[in-house]
Image: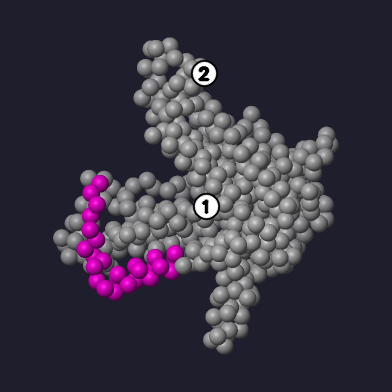
Amino acid sequence: MVAGALLLPLVAVAWRAEGWGGLRVSDWGALWFTLWQAAVSAALSVLLAVPVARALARRRFPGRGAVVLLLGAPFILPVIVAVLGLVAVFGRSGVANTALGWLGVEPVSIYGWQGVILAHVFFNMPLGTRLILQGWLSLPGERLRLAASLGFDAGDTFRRLEWPMLRALVPGIFVVIFLICTTSFAVALALGGGPRATTVELAIYQAFRFDFDLSRAALLGALQLLIGGGAALLSLRLALPSGFGAGLDRVTPRWDSRGPGLRMQDGAAIGLACLFLLLPMALVLGGGVVHVAGLPGSVWLAALRSLLIALSAAILTTALAFVMALAVVTTRRGGWVEVAGTLSIAASPLVLGTGLYILLLPVANPVALALPVTAFVNVVLALPFALRALIPAMRDLHRDYGQLSASLGVTGFAWVRLVALPRLRRPAGFAAGLTAALAAGDLGVIALFASPDQATLPLVLYQLMGSYRMEDARAAAVLLVALSLGLFWLFERGGRHAAA
């Protein structure tokens, strides 16, 4: 059923697509820009992540845990809010251009390819840092201790221990970030556009909304699917290594990094990364919180729609992931169930939305179903993350309590209520919170389908930015951040509290 829900829209896209001859010159330009900006964004994200991860691996200081936690925030932060923050820093009247003006330098524009790449680095440098940091922390302490006893300095340690780890880890991280950047729609919509900064996703939106050319939109959707599928297959081939040798898991001091120059270098890397991530958010949230009470009623109604979509998606995704995780662990064909649940990692909201529109058009008015369709697409896209949280926990549960439950005759709904739910609340709460946060901030399908009276909060925020009502936009951003992070916190904390 899950595979069908994913594949039917994709089959509809392929069926409606014209031959490749239907692509315009501008569409090939969009393909080139999609691949080019994704490659540059991924390369910059990884290059900037390496010194930050190295500094975090070498230093222990008060607040280090908060810094690592901050690196996870962009993943659940609504994209359109981050874009608004970057405009506040790098826009024409932003902090950066004001500083350049004081120095007598011409202002720079955030709109165009440079803005798209900057936003992608903002979102993916923290992801790269966390992944590379895991690799750094997986280096056995005994090897670092041996390196210190042999008199290795920082350069020797890098060449002998750290470089082999990076060489094994970085290609996989690059491809994962490349895949994310090829399916990024909201960034290209807000900061891109024009013949030199249009991605395939944005071209689908333009063919759909402005030209209402379903055949061309479907053709572009097929092209996007090929890009995403190819990158996903490559990322599977370059799966991230899980470790770089065995040790006794001791925390080992870094004797090779005690010099004042290295301390300053690490401090600068961590400080600049925090400034890059925090300043946009501080400007948006600080400038918007005082205007929240004055937001018009239409914004609050949009927030209510986003809340309903987020709750629906969270409940459906978690329930579906629970059933699928159980099937993965207890059935002989569990591997296929897991594959079906993770297929959507290669799809994008725009491609699924185009396929669903084509499927619904002969039997119903797709615009009237914009909100249910948005919730449905978010369920499909969040399912791989929910499965990643629930399957390991379900395996542990089956291993620890499977035989005991069977010997006591506890099966069916009684097993779910008495055995599974009390022990899976923590991963289930995380899965529900993550889905709710992502769905609340989604600006994909709703931009494709919605009529003005069905707009969700991210779409309203984008419209406020477009009409230069920046005070209302910042206030709506505060509301959206509170909604997304609040839902994540409630579900995740609720799961932890119940499991305690």
Which residue appears at 40% of the width and 58% of the height?
67
Residue range in magenta is: 249-274
Q: Nearer the viewer, residue 429 or 56?
A: 429
Q: Quadrant of the C terminus?
A: top left
* Residue 343 relative to residue 426: left or right: right
Q: Is residue 334 above or below residue 131?
A: above
Which residue appears at 50% of the width and 30% of the height?
325
Residue assigned mark 2 = 413
Q: Quadrant of the N terminus?
A: top right
Eye-nearest disc, 1 or 2: 2
The amino acid type, in three-letter code, at marker 1 is Phe
Give the image's coloring scheme: one colour
Which residue appears at 63% of the width and 37% of the height?
312
Q: Position of residue 280 (x, y in %)?
A: 54, 65
Q: Nearer the viewer, residue 452 or 213?
A: 452
Quarter where residue 62 is shown: bottom left
Q: Is residue 409 above or below residue 141?
A: above
Q: Chief secondary structure of the magenta span? A: helix
Residue assigned mark 1 = 75
The amino acid type, in three-letter code, at marker 2 is Phe
